[in-house]
Image (tube, coloured by chain):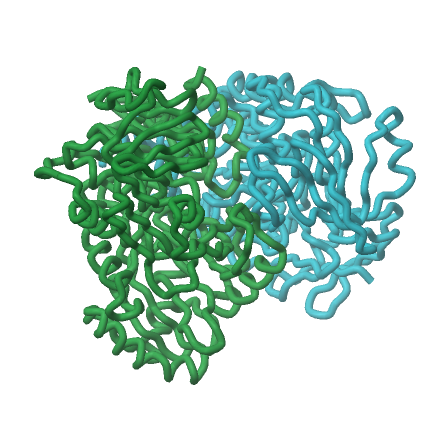
Chain colours: A green, B cyan
């Protein structure tokens, strides 16, 4: 099937295979429309692609995974510390198993580095047994307590004063960019229509069809799924509900250079106490080290800038955890906005009579839970009168390997691949060792980038310590050449 | 993994002026097979995209342009008999003096009898300077800007702010003007002496001294640079382009991965007057050692490394336990920063230093274990962003088994 991705022009059924014009205007009609192509929306679209449905996936921006999904801590959680019995606890638990299997199958980089909740004072040390018990209640049984000596042996670069830790051996790090891209790629290859630069302005809900007025014209859909992330509350209100309010919670993070990677083996998590939550230090699958995030409740859903105060705060906390980290060069500072709702659980609600499912309040665990959320939402759709039919196998996808510690070597290390195609031996981005072949492949991919930033998330090109000093102009030239 | 294994006599990593100078001199002096590896498709280093003049000339306005200078360095190395391979990246070490490489022709593992690191320096990008704000397009370093304008003829923008007030900052401003942009201001955290304006007649770009960048603004595109003067005043400079200049950091990844000790001040490999690092058989030259000196200095260092490399190839000897030379604040760094056992003098018979703060005719003191070795008053002010020098005649008085040699400002 020819993949359908549109980025501009009015939406019309003409030329959109599988849709039919729903009114005199030629606007397309879908069985299901997912609003929001973040990691959750893309996972839902992928799940729906298994059924004989006409499905559309919309996003207001020019790329998938371009909001909260692109700026998280990139951790594949176990759910050991979720609220026991909550929907989030269940979906995180199920989601991590599904995503781990899916990652192995598709080549999404995952490293099972394990996490240590490090106690820095007596209060935190005293809190660890309760956290261990909570992990057990969340059906996680591999956690165990480490004393100060064992902790020091595991993490010799920790700052002075660490008293002990709770070890969660299955906490993992994952590539936050490849995951939604894999979902979207598979969905689009299986026939889902992806419409980008398509912001929903207004919704009219009739008896059997929703009419969405977007920045790119009108579309009709029988069922509607709200996966609009930070804007899920606004979409919800557009449909006449007032179930929740999204308060953007900003998390600022500092990414340190790869030369810092040897300083830390595990994800170092803070112990939550009454005094608040601290910050984490975690390796990334790209071989960097993350420090963050902050947690700032804001009003502005576009405030993804970093601030001097937060950078100073993170550095001060990081210095305590891993003093040598602060001597290393900073590669990037970024901020993401989590969709907090003031509730300690996901806000997933189906309104069968309206043929509408709201998927709100998916906070930092959304990446981990995404596949389980998708399965849950699909079930809810089935319960609301949509005849799903029998699922079929999706066409398999193999994603480019962006990870450092992965069984499959990266192209620059792969003699066979370079022999077959010398473009994989032609390095363009030197800091990240990204070859011309990988950039070419990404530009010609099923879901191609529409900006140099999108190319960066697909290849790592320009993502390194020089931030484009060496390769920025060359990468932009390749991007512009592919577009013209 | 299939890697072609090869051996050479001298392997030079980096084909800028320093590496090319080393290659030319070594090949000409019969060092055997001398191979220069350059990861870019074209050798020549930074001068390739510096279209201003002054390369290779001492007098202001003398010399040639960067690209011509780069071509000259390449031609000299090739003519001397060095093997220059472009598009070859050294990806890591495989022990001792053996490195792994990636190229379109495949993977190799190259063992050398001596390795010369000449990997250069880069400007710290906005992120490494911890500049807060949004992350819109339109944010450059000079290196990226010059390549975009001179090598790729890309459209840049219309109004630019330049961060920095060093020679490289003015080169960035010139490049912006060539690309048709208005340079609305140059911003520096340093005080700006009034005399500076006189040295650039016709350049009416305001220089905002004692001013730092508080934040960048804009989403789809940069819309402005928020600045803060040291007296607390703030302002937003409206622009669609900002160039972060200077603030050099040696590209030391390969050196560090090879276990070579770095100097705390320069962040490049610690080295002695003979360009020997702490790794046996590993030499270093050029701006990997000191960010940054001119292309001419880099080339001269490259040439100067030939004699010690040949000596090492002949004798296999390598010094151990050399005293370090360290500076104290406000001095930023000194190079070279190890004392060789043979009392060798650095290039030009002088050490190169940088300061974090402007110093009016400072008195420099050199001591080892409490014993004064040298004192020297500088006649000119030492200013951040510019090198100054210390005579090296005292190195034969250093106790080779003594402690760190300390350089301070009295």
Q: Is residue B32 left or right of residue A51?
A: right
Quadrant in which the C terminus of chain A appears: top left
Name the residue located 50 percent from the left edge and 60 percent from the top edge.
A294
Residue A71 in the image, given as x and y percentages of width and height: 44, 48
Name the residue located 60 percent from the left edge and 64 percent from the top edge.
B401
- How many numbered discs sit on the rendered protein? 0
Residue A115 in the image, given as x and y percentages of width and height: 32, 65
Quadrant hosting residue B341? bottom right
Question: In front here: B218 or A143?
Answer: B218
| Residue A182 in view (yes/no) | no
Question: In front here: B44 or A112?
Answer: A112
Quadrant hosting residue B7? top left
Name the residue located 26 percent from the left edge and 58 percent from the top edge.
A92
Quadrant hosting residue B184? top right
Q: Is residue A57 left or right of residue A100?
A: right
Q: Is residue B40 left or right of residue B354?
A: left
Extreme front residue here? A207
| Residue B267 in view (yes/no) | yes
Q: Is residue B380 left or right of residue B24?
A: right
Indicate whether B235 appears above or below A217.
below
Residue B275 in the image, given as x and y percentages of width and height: 58, 43
Question: In front here: B185 or B83?
Answer: B185
Residue A313 in the image, given as x and y percentages of width and height: 57, 63
Quadrant in which the N terminus of chain A appears: top left
């Amino acid at each position: 099937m020819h993949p359908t991705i549109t980025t501009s022009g009015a939406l019309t059924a003409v030329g959109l295979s599988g849709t039919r014009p729903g009114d005199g205007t030629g606007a397309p009609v879908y069985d299901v429309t997912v609003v929001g192509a973040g990691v959750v929306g893309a996972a839902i679209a992928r799940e729906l692609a298994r059924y004989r449905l006409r499905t559309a996936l919309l996003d207001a921006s020019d790329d998938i995974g371009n909001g909260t999904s692109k700026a998280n801590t990139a951790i594949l959680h176990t759910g050991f510390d979720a609220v026991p019995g909550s929907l989030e606890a269940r979906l995180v638990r199920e989601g991590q198993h599904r995503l781990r299997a899916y990652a192995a199958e598709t080549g999404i980089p995952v490293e099972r580095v394990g996490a240590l909740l490090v106690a820095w004072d007596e209060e935190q040390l005293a809190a660890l047994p309760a956290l261990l018990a909570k992990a057990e209640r969340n059906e996680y049984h591999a956690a165990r307590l480490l004393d100060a000596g064992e902790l020091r042996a595991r993490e010799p670069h920790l700052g002075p004063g660490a008293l002990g830790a709770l070890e969660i051996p299955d906490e993992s790090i994952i590539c936050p960019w490849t995951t939604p891209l894999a979902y979207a790629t598979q969905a689009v290859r299986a026939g889902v229509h992806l419409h980008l630069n398509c912001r929903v302005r207004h919704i009219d809900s009739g008896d059997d069809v929703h009419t969405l007025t977007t920045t790119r014209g009108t579309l009709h859909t029988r069922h509607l799924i709200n996966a609009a992330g930070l804007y899920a509350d606004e979409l919800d209100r557009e449909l006449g509900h007032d179930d929740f309010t999204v308060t953007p919670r900003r998390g600022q993070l500092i990414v340190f250079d790869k030369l810092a990677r040897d300083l830390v083996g595990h994800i170092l998590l803070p112990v939550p106490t009454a005094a608040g939550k601290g910050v984490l230090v975690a390796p990334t699958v790209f071989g960097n080290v993350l420090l963050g995030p902050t947690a700032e409740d804001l009003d502005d859903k576009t405030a993804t800038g970093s601030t001097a105060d937060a950078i100073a705060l993170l550095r001060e906390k990081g210095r305590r955890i891993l003093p040598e980290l602060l001597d290393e060069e900073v590669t990037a500072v970024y901020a993401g906005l989590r969709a907090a709702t003031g509730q300690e659980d996901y806000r997933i609600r189906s309104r069968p009579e309206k043929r509408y499912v709201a998927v709100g309040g998916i906070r930092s665990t959304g990446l981990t839970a995404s596949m389980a959320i998708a399965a849950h939402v699909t079930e809810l759709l089935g319960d609301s009168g949509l005849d799903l039919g029998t699922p079929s196998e999706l066409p398999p996808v193999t994603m480019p390997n962006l990870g450092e510690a992965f069984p499959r070597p990266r192209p620059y290390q792969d003699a066979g691949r370079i022999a077959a195609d010398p473009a994989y031996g032609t390095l363009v981005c030197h800091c990240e060792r990204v070859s011309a072949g990988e950039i070419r492949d990404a530009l010609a991919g099923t879901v191609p980038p529409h900006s140099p930033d999108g190319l960066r998330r697909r290849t790592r090109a320009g993502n390194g310590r020089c931030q484009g000093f060496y390769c920025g102009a060359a990468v932009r030239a390749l991007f512009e050449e592919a577009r013209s | 993994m299939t890697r072609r294994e090869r051996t050479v006599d001298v392997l030079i990593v980096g084909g800028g002026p320093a590496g090319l100078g080393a290659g030319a001199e070594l090949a000409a002096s019969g060092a055997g097979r001398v191979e220069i590896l350059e990861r870019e498709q074209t050798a020549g280093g930074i001068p390739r995209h510096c279209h201003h003049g002054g390369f290779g000339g001492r007098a202001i306005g003398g010399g040639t342009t960067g690209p011509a200078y780069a071509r000259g360095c390449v031609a000299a190395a090739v003519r001397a008999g060095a093997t220059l391979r472009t598009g070859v990246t050294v990806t890591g070490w495989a022990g001792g003096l053996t490195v792994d490489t990636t190229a379109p022709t495949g993977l190799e593992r190259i063992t050398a009898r001596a390795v010369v690191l000449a990997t250069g320096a880069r400007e710290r990008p906005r992120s490494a300077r911890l500049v807060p704000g949004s992350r819109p397009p339109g944010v450059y370093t000079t290196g990226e800007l010059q390549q975009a304008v001179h090598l790729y003829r890309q459209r840049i923008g219309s109004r630019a702010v330049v961060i920095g007030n060093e020679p490289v900052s003015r080169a960035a401003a010139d490049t912006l003007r060539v690309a048709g942009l208005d340079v609305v201001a140059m911003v520096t955290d340093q005080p700006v002496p009034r005399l500076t304006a006189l040295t650039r007649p016709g350049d009416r770009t305001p220089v905002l001294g004692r001013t730092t960048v508080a934040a960048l603004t804009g989403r789809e595109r940069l819309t402005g640079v928020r600045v803060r003067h040291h007296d607390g005043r703030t302002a937003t400079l409206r622009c669609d382009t900002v160039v972060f200049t200077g603030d050099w950091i040696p590209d030391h990844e390969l050196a560090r991965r090879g276990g070579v000790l770095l100097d705390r001040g320069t962040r490049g490999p610690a080295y002695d007057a003979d360009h020997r690092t702490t790794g046996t058989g590993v030499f270093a030259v050029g701006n990997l050692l000191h960010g940054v000196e001119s292309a001419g200095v880099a080339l001269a260092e490259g040439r100067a490394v030939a004699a010690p490399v040949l000596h090492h190839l002949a004798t296999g000897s390598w010094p151990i336990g050399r005293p370090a030379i360290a500076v104290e604040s406000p001095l930023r760094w000194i190079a070279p920063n190890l004392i060789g056992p043979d009392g060798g003098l650095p290039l030009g018979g002088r050490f190169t230093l940088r300061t974090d703060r402007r110093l009016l005719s400072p008195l420099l003191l050199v001591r080892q274990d409490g014993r004064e070795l040298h004192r020297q008053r500088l006649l000119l002010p030492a200013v951040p962003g510019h090198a100054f020098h210390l005579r090296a005649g005292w190195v034969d008085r250093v106790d080779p088994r003594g402690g760190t040699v300390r350089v301070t400002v009295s």
